[in-house]
Image (cartoon, rainbow, N blue to C red):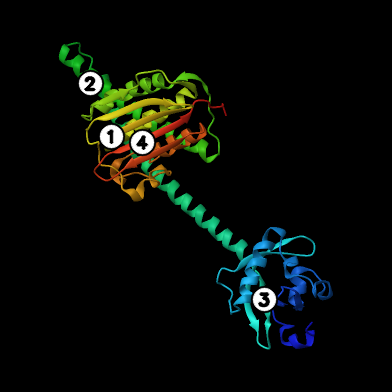
Amino acid sequence: MRSPVEFGALEFMPDAVVVVDHLGIICFINRAGEALFGYERSELIGRPVEVLLPSRFRLKHRIDREAYAAAPRVRPMGLGLELRGLTKDGHEVEIEISLSPVEFDAQLTLAAVRDVSERKRLEEQARQAEKAQEEVRRRDEVLAVASHELRGPVGVVQLQLGVLQRTAGDTIHELTGMMERMRKVESNARHLARLVDDLLDMRQLQGGTLPLQAEEADLAELTRDAVERVREPVERTGATLTLLAPVAVRGRWDPIRIEQVVTNLVANAAKFGQGKPIVVEVESEGDRARITVTDQGIGIATRDLERIFERFERVAPSSGGLGLGLYIARQIVLAHGGRILVRSAVGSGATFTVELPRETRSA
């Protein structure tokens, strides 16, 4: 065993220093090492270096150490050699290590060990602060979009109601005009309700809860009801809306939430479908049920296929809406224990597939 005198130059280094032989036995530890790990020097000399690591890291460290001993080289800090150290009292600390052979004895390895717990804590704080700033930026963005989106329908509703109040005649022409204005009021009121519902759902999701009221239902019937609810505004875009649901698909789901998913997907298909046909299909396979919504519109770039399910993301920034529809749809599907997939390419339309288990528990 080497004498501590031979390592005198290492005694007062600011970093902890541990010297081990080719078998991984501790030959020397300096004062900083004693302070970091909480041991007296005499308690460590002659023991395997793995005693300074949590048990879950010891086997891998032993393998890595043996590989290093076979081809020793300088490995400075900052090259990703990070571990967790274990103090005498069982406390774990995050550490960074540099390795180098000892000049006067090639069978010895010097490890300089630095406690980076505080640095990691500050880095995590910085990441959290950056994330919070991004959340604020995105919140401000969606509020700006929301105010714009809400202002339009509110203005239309107010204008049309004013016209209706001034129109009291009973001629066929006047009644026809009134019916058309009522249709516009209804359409804009429906749009307003959808925006408000999306904002409320987002607030619930931010709180980590999306309550489900699951009950026995026919997925084909739920989808049919949702399709009929949006058929008129969809077909006003010039698109044909076809439902293929020839047989009942029984299961246990939240009817309101499932209809919301279908409505969001069909509305999305209509928005980007360029007036081309939209097909909705319901089928089952074993203990799984499936809803597919296919359009022949502008399609989605491969790089955007995952991004479109994030909050406030829109396929095209000028497309309107809050960018919450697909995000909410996926959260609803996930809450049911299912998944939602998309297959698309630019110019080739898009196919959204919702897969659901037949049995869903109420949250």
Could you tell which of marks 3 and 2 lies nearer the N-terminus? Answer: 3
The residues bearing labels 4 and 2 have C-alpha atoms spaced at a distance of 34 Å
Quarter-wise, where is residue 155 in the image? top left
Query: What residue is disc 4 on?
Result: 352
The earlier-in-sequence mark between 3 and 4 is 3
Asked whether the viewer can see residue 117, the reply is no
Disc 3, disc 1: CB below 8 Å? no
Residue 84 image-quadrant placement: bottom right
Report the residue marked by disc 3.
111
Which quadrant does the N terminus fall into?
bottom right
- Does residue 172 appear left or right of residue 289 in this picture? left
* Tag 2: amino acid: Glu
What's the amino acid at mark 4?
Phe
Circle nearer the viewer, 1 or 2: 1
Q: Is residue 260 left or right of residue 244?
A: right
Q: Nearer the viewer, mark 3 or mark 2?
A: 3
Q: Residue at x 76, y 78 (%)?
A: 27
Q: Which residue is mark 1?
A: 295
Mark 4 / mark 2, whichever is N-terminal: 2
Callout 1 crowding tier (Cα within 10 Å): few <14, some 14–19, many ≥20 = many
Real-space Cα separation, disc 3 to disc 1, in angstroms? 61 Å
Residue 38: image location, x then y, percent: 79, 68
For this orientation, the residue located farthest to the front is 70
Who comes first in sequence, dot 3 or dot 1?
3
Under mark 1, the amino acid is: Asp
The answer to whether any part of residue 27 appears in the image is: yes
Identify the secondary structure beneath mark 2.
helix
Q: Secondary structure at mark 1?
A: strand
